[in-house]
Image (cartoon, coloured by chain):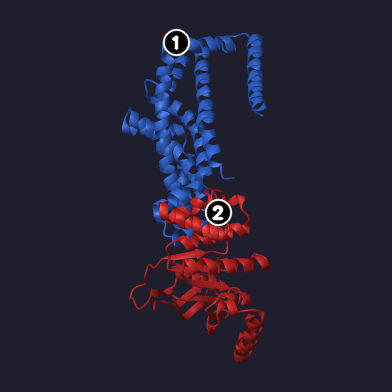
Chain colours: A blue, B red
Amino acid sequence: MRHSSLLKPVLSISLLLLIWQVLSIFINTAVLPSPFVVFNTLILAIKSGELLYHLGFTLYRLCLSFFIAMMLGVSIGLLLGRSEKVNQFFNSWLIIFLNIPALVTTILCYVWFGLIETAAIFAIVINKLPNVIVTIREGAKNIDEELVEMATVYQLGHLKTLQHVILPQLFPYIMAAARTGLSLIWKIVLVVELLGRSNGMGYQIHLFFQLFDISSILAYTVSFIIIIHFIEIAILQPLDKAAKQWK
Amino acid sequence: MTHLYVNIEKKAFSPVGLPASSNVFSDFKLDFNTQQLTCIIGPSGCGKTTLLNIIAGIDKDFTGSVRLNDQPQSTDHKVSYVFQTPRLLPWRTVLENIQLIIGNSPSSLLKTQEVLQQLGLLEQLNSYPAHLSIGMQRRVSLARAVVSDSETLLMDEPFVSLDMANAAKARQLLLQVLEQHPKHVIFVTHDMDEALTLADRIVFLSGAPCQILADIPISTERLARNNDWLNTFKATLKKDNPNLKTTF
């Protein structure tokens, strides 16, 4: 069981690497370096400490904005999902924020607040927040009223009701928001760094673009693909498993 | 002697999407002696569940009051409720479901174990609700309501989906548990025999707007209520109250 569950992803990744290798030999240009070249560049970048320095900054921004966006998004989403009146009033705001391009909010944040860290974090949060709100709102609309009534009858109080009755029901929606959120934040955080920071992956990739250093761009990309897989396997999947224990 | 006074001046129910609303209750008054087990019988849709929800404090959309004795204010008296469905939290075990209500002190654990044993559920202490039969889930719901330190126990057709033999067994269990943990019980049912087996008093309600058709005390010992007694009682009831014909 365990054997075969590991085998498939390994095979599919190998196939991808093989296609890449064959293509790079076939085309034979500097714009598509082979996996080996990229791997060597990756090792060099790790050894020099440069990659870890920039990856560290990007991860720090990712974590901070992720947690702020999740906390705010869950609270606001819950409020909108539980109160039809508030939802009707703010729905148009949500649609506006959902559809403003990340580039616009990022530029505006830098213009209004200056080229500072807070502006960068704020820009990422603003981009991510509407998605969390929409997902959590859906979950809040599907909360079992009967269980909430039970909590009211037995006078559980707001905090216990939230912790033991509402949040467990929201859990699948929180996980969905976390997954889509992580991938969205990765994409935004690089744009934000490219536009107004002097460190981080986005800044570095911009630099490599100007130098036309494709193998470094690919090496950095590979490094954060590895990180994303690590987050999925080490954090998200165990959380999923723990939550399904009762089923 | 404590009394619970329910006074509903007006309770309207507006079906979703319809502006017109009809009164479920208007000028409805009913008081309960809290030493007794009162059964409420009425046709479907007459507002029995609404009445329980108002007493439980879930339904606050009405004019009137629910008071203990002659206190001027609506009191926040403690209520436990056995709903038509068990309403257990699926992500908590039987014990955790109950401990959420009464806390996890050693004394509450002891009380929980004692009641669960009486209800034949001790082995299921650490099971999740999804692994229990519906009958077991109902008993857990009953256990939760009994161990909670409430004054009033509301029961809304709790045995409705059980077959006759199991329902009879469940009623006996209810009476046994109540003997050890006495509570004021308001029991809604549409089953005349069930009401006659359990009640100290039966209140018959009419269809909407809800009115009290008859209010009948039963003084016969529960043990003496055999089939013959049930039949005689029902026959006399029919003769004395011709307006009750439609309800059973």
Q: What residue lies at 37% left-to-right and 30% top-to-bottom?
A: A120
Please, what is the three-letter code of the amino acid marked with disc 1? Lys
- Label 1 Cα neighbours within 10 Å, binned few <14 / some 14-19 / many ≥20: few
**Percent coordinates x, y for residue A239 in the rendering:** 51, 36
Figure check: A222 above or below A47: below
**Percent coordinates x, y for residue B228 in the rendering:** 66, 82
Question: Which corner quadrant holds the N terminus of chain B?
Answer: bottom left
Q: What residue lies at 57% left-to-right and 61% top-to-bottom?
A: B85
Same chain for labels 2 and 1? Say yes or no: no
| Chain that bears disc 2 | B
Please, what is the three-letter code of the amino acid marked with disc 2? Leu
| Chain that bears disc 1 | A
Figure check: A217 above or below B50: above
Are the two marked residues, 2 and 1, in contact with CB atoms closer than 8 angstroms? Answer: no
Question: Which corner quadrant holds the C terminus of chain B?
Answer: bottom right
Point out the frontmost of discs 2 and 1.
2
**Percent coordinates x, y for residue B111 in the rendering:** 46, 58
Q: What residue lies at 48% left-to-right and 41% top-to-bottom?
A: A132
In the image: residue B7, left or right of residue B174: left
Secondary element type, mark 2: helix
Q: Which mark is residue B122?
A: 2
In this figure, which residue is indicated by the disc labeled 1?
A: A47
**Percent coordinates x, y for residue B81 in the rendering:** 49, 65
Q: Which mark is residue A162?
A: none
Q: In whole angstroms, how far apart are the C-alphas of marks 2 and 1?
A: 61 Å
Q: Is any part of residue B86 visible from this angle?
A: no
Q: Quadrant of residue B218?
A: bottom right
B110 and B78: which one is in front? B110
Numbered disc total? 2
